[in-house]
Image: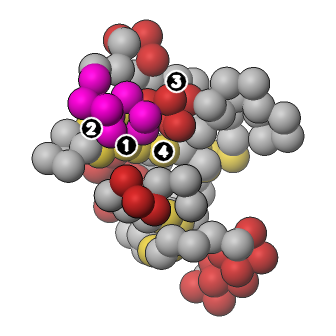
């Protein structure tokens, strides 16, 4: 809601093979998501961005240039660092994100991928 007036668009993408559309919709409603959540049934989007865990965010600017990749914050319970918010605020202000802040480590469950013939889909 803090970014409604700032021309920011949020999109959730679920790439886990085992989760059905009905489950995704129910979870989105329960969490109060006010943005679309799409299904990535063949992991094409996850593969394109190199996503490995969930939740993992990718911030693109208005020209669709990747500006930040990583965690939303540093804790699911009581975060003290807000990586995505800080990156968003810098991009909106037209400023560069400092190099050490352009990518953060993601802690979360691995994405359960669709098996592709001849491809090793295991997450390290």
Residue at left offset 63%, top offset 70%:
33
Distance from Cα at disc 1 to Cα at disc 3: 12 Å
Disc 2 target residue:
66
Residue at left offset 65%, top offset 89%:
22
Disc 3 target residue:
104
Distance from Cα at disc 2 to Cα at disc 3: 14 Å
Other-residue count near label 3 (Cα within 10 Å), few / some / many at <14 / 14–19 / ≥20? some
- Are dots 3 and 4 in contact, CB under 8 Å? no
Name the secondary structure under disc 1.
Answer: strand
- Kindly identify which numbered label has been placed on residue 57: 4
- In this view of the protein, which residue sits in the foreground, 71 or 48? 71
Query: Does residue 19 show up?
Result: no
Residue 108 is situated, as x and y percent measured from the top left of the image, at 69, 41
Q: Say whether residue 94 is magenta.
A: yes
Disc 1 target residue:
59
- Are dots 2 and 1 in contact, CB under 8 Å? yes
Name the secondary structure under disc 4.
Answer: strand
- Are dots 4 and 1 in contact, CB under 8 Å? yes
Residue at left offset 36%, top offset 13%:
98
Quick check: 74 left or right of 85? Answer: right
Distance from Cα at disc 2 to Cα at disc 1: 6 Å
């Amino acid at each position: 809601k803090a970014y409604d007036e700032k021309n920011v668009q949020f999109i959730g993408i679920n790439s886990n093979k085992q989760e059905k559309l009905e489950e995704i919709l129910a979870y989105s409603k329960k969490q109060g998501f006010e943005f679309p959540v799409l299904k990535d049934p063949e992991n094409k989007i996850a593969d394109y961005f190199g996503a490995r865990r969930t939740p993992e965010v990718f911030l693109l600017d208005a020209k669709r240039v990747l500006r930040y990749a990583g965690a939303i914050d540093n804790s699911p319970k009581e975060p003290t660092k807000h990586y995505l918010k800080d990156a968003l605020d810098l991009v909106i202000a037209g400023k560069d994100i400092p190099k050490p802040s352009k990518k953060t480590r993601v802690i979360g469950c691995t994405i359960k991928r669709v098996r592709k013939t001849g491809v090793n889909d295991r997450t390290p």
